[in-house]
Image (spheres, rainbow, N blue to C red):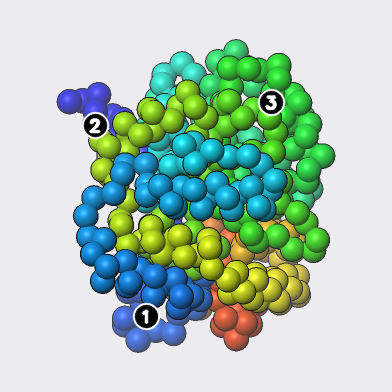
Amino acid sequence: MMHTVAAFDRIGEENAFAVLARANVLAAQGRDIINLGIGQPDFRTPDFIVEAAIKALRDGHHGYTPATGIPQLREAVAADLHKRFSVAVSPDSVMIMPGGKPTMFMTIMMFGEPGVDILYPDPGFPIYRSMIEFTGANPVPVPIREENGFAFSAEETLQLLTPNARLLIVNSPANPTGGVTPKNEVDRLVAGLEQFPDVAVMSDEIYDHMTYDGEKHVCLLSYPSIRDRLVLLNGWSKTYAMTGWRLGYAVWPDKLYDYARKLAVNLHSCVNASAQYAGLAALQGPQDDVYKMVAEFDRRRKVVVDGLNKIPGVSCATPKGAFYAFPNIKKTKWKAKALASSLLEDAGVAIIGGPDFGILGEGYVRLSYANSTENILKALTRMGEFLESRKAA
């Protein structure tokens, strides 16, 4: 029993949800709160997708579905990946998941155990490290540096690989930084991985539609040399404003697929039936809403970066993807989490302190620009006024 408790004591969490809960409490008390904390599009799910789910329910899709997902949705995922990235994907390697996190959970559970290394981006999505520590594996942070445009460095990543390494997690476009790793860097990483044939790769590509300034997303499925050890994570949450639908997918290498299927049977049985029909409509229907949403994020991105760089003591590199800015606040002399907390309580602006994304996150905060331009401008004004009136504690 004590061993179990010790393992659960190692689990972390995603503090963006704690900030959201606190922001909601303050709002319920009548406070005017602007939430730039949660990574959630402020758009509605497109109507034709909602209608597809309603139709599925009316048509009687109320029962269990296959643990791996309905066949036509797996086929649609494979077709979409082929269309966008010219990669051949068998529907038999696609698994429909209840969101993105279960793919992280399953992959890290497969490779994590005491005595092995798992590499993950830092700053990065907090669940990576949380799950690595839960398995007892050694978490090895891969530094994601501002001076490198918040892209990962292939050279630095490869230098961290040891004979104990079992899994490398990569994320581009990235949360929390908005960094996009260019193709030449990905090329170098994949070439270097040939020297480490026992290291699996999990590529989190949930923001693959959201790139700016001419950047092109590089899908790791495009590299044949690692296909037999690559797990791809993706889904509908960000692209189609479907966070609450809990719908994602993974592409598994053949040797891992049945393990993932068994985990799904043990864990969640199957994914919600009507949500899968909504996901099918999303992939096969018009993509106009996706393009409009990304164009709007692009406009807001410019507003956020411009506004942050006008605040004394704050500097913000231009994010190339996702919908996050990760400004440097070191010159304000504030600790990041203290600043985030004070901004929420005293200025009514919810953001996330950089250390919630890793040990290298100190000196930064994350703002999501998945909010209206009006609210973003108001939040930036409040931040500027707060920092002018309050010296670091």
| Separation of marks 3 and 1 at Cα, in angstroms | 51 Å
* Residue at screen point 54% across, 57% down: 353
- The circle on residue 27 is 1
Instruction: Kindly identify which residue carries mark 2.
Output: 5
Residue type at mark 1? Ala
Looking at this view, is 101 or 393 the one in front? 101
Q: Quadrant of the N terminus?
A: top left
Q: Is residue 141 above or below residue 310?
A: above
Q: Which picture quadrant has residue 8?
A: top left
Q: Is residue 79 above or below residue 93?
A: below
Residue type at mark 2? Val
Q: Are marks 2 and 3 in contact (CB under 8 Å)?
A: no
Instruction: Kindly identify which residue carries mark 3.
Output: 225
Check disc 1 and report its element: helix, strand or loop.
helix
The spot of residue 282 in percent (x, y) is 50, 65
**Crowdedness of circle 1 by 10 Å Cα count: few (<14), some, many (20+)?**
some
Q: Are marks 1 and 2 in contact (CB under 8 Å)?
A: no
Residue type at mark 3? Ser
Give the mark nearer the N terminus: 1 vs 2.
2
